[in-house]
Image (cartoon, rainbow, N blue to C red):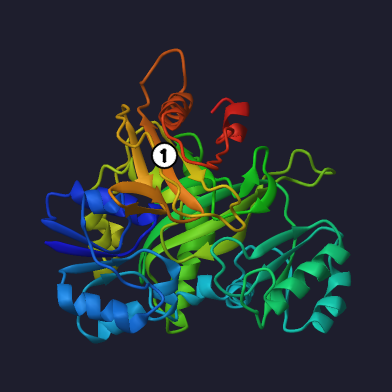
Amino acid sequence: MKVLVIGGGGREHAIVWALRKSARVTEVVCAPGNAGIAQSARTVPVNTGDLAAMLRVVEAERPALTVVGPELPLSLGLVDELHRRGLRVFGPTQAATRLESSKSFAKEFMQRHAIPTAAYAVCRSLEEVRRELPRFSASVVVKADGLAAGKGVVICQSHAEAEQAAQEIFSGALLGTAEKELVLEEFLDGEELSFFALCDGKHAVALAAAQDHKRIGEGDTGPNTGGMGAYTADGLMSAELEQWLLANVAQPVVDKMASEGSPFHGILFCGMMMTPPPSNQPDGSIKPMVLEFNTRFGDPETEAILVRLESDIVDLFDAAIDGTAERLAIKMKPGASVCVIAASGGYPGKVVNGQPISGLDQQHPDTVVFHAGTAAKDGTIVTAGGRVLAVTAVSSASASPSTTPLEDALAKAYAALEEISFDGMQLRRDIAWRALRKGL
């Protein structure tokens, strides 16, 4: 079968890589793709913010299946338009995508249906922000309502900082475009967990869990980014926690979205905060709280997850489309995996593209270099974005008696990065530091 993947980042490179492993797939096309994707799939130029242009690509290619990677085409209604044409497509509808494309919708949805999340207020003006801020403690999170590529969340240490962040969101100074709404949210402390569920409109099935690293600096310092790295490991999520997340978050989302007329098909990414018990109840249990939903594969978590996926990825796509996810036995390779992002200098701010990248021809065991923001120029691969490469390594559960699978995967990823360079390259060298501290 011929499969078309919409998108051109590290997530889409990982999806293309997984599709190439499927015995069911004869051809993979990616629009627009990038320089790395072009080495294993045919690429077609397209603007993923132009719905008509994407539809023209689908109509010209006539794939047996279209897989929509990024959030923007989902929010524009690409899936809806392909449904109207009777074509098979993996991803949620525009209405279902509101769980990600509108933070106010997501918070109000969770409140309606008692899904655990932080206290919040939706504000449409700076005056409303000033009026609502006294409800919150000094630390407060300010979130742009719409899509912001991971850069629309500001963690503030004071109400004055929060008001300044709100002003920048409303004016367009933060994101380049002015937002009409924002969400003030109670700051939650704890460890983050990214939980992925495959959904078919009726059922939510656990796929995997990962831990992302959003801050640009080591030790989780500096501004938020789209993600500087992620890891997965067998011990990251217990069977009991997995069942709790399915029963209390993912399945209620599927049930209630269906009851409200917007059945959810695709990947539901549940961004969780594992909040510790209060200091006056030290023997209490950790309380998982939803920070956000994404309505597609996350990035860079996807790169780490898919290198461990043993099931045929097309089977996952079919199950989500056909309503048969509960019959699917998803198999993951035991062990651990790590994805480390190599980013351009200046990221998450202004970056300079066109820097030649060296070291990409090196081969390393159990390691895949996924391209996130690259282009080909005069026969050379150059930088073309903030996040440039997603260097991903995997380790089996029995890789070495002297190191854990996670330590082994980290060593492989960082060894590969030692061979890669471009002007201004920056990366975090402490990916999975929390897990290592706990001996995972």
Q: Is residue 240 visible?
A: no
Above or below: residue 104 compared with residue 279 = below
Residue where numbered disc 1 is placed:
391
| Residue 32 image position (x, y, % from top left) | 31, 65
Q: Say whether residue 158 is left or right of residue 348.
A: right
Q: What residue lies at 41% left-to-right and 27% top-to-bottom? A: 412
Where's residue 85, x and y in %?
Answer: 21, 85
Give the quarter of the image for residue 176.
bottom right
273, 428: nearer the viewer: 428
The x, y position of residue 210, in whole percent, is 49, 45
Task: Give the amino acid type for the residue marked by disc 1 in the picture.
Answer: Val
- Residue 436 vs 2, above or below: the answer is above
Front-lying residue, 221 or 87: 221
Q: Secondary structure at mark 1?
A: strand
**x%, y% of residue 45?**
28, 68
Q: Residue at x 48, y 55 (%)?
A: 353
Query: Which quarter of the image is occupied by the N terminus?
Result: bottom left
| Direction from residue 107 to residue 344 in the image, left or right | left
Q: Nearer the viewer, residue 276 or 183?
A: 183
Residue that sits furthest to the front in the current view: 378
Residue 253 shows up from this direction: yes
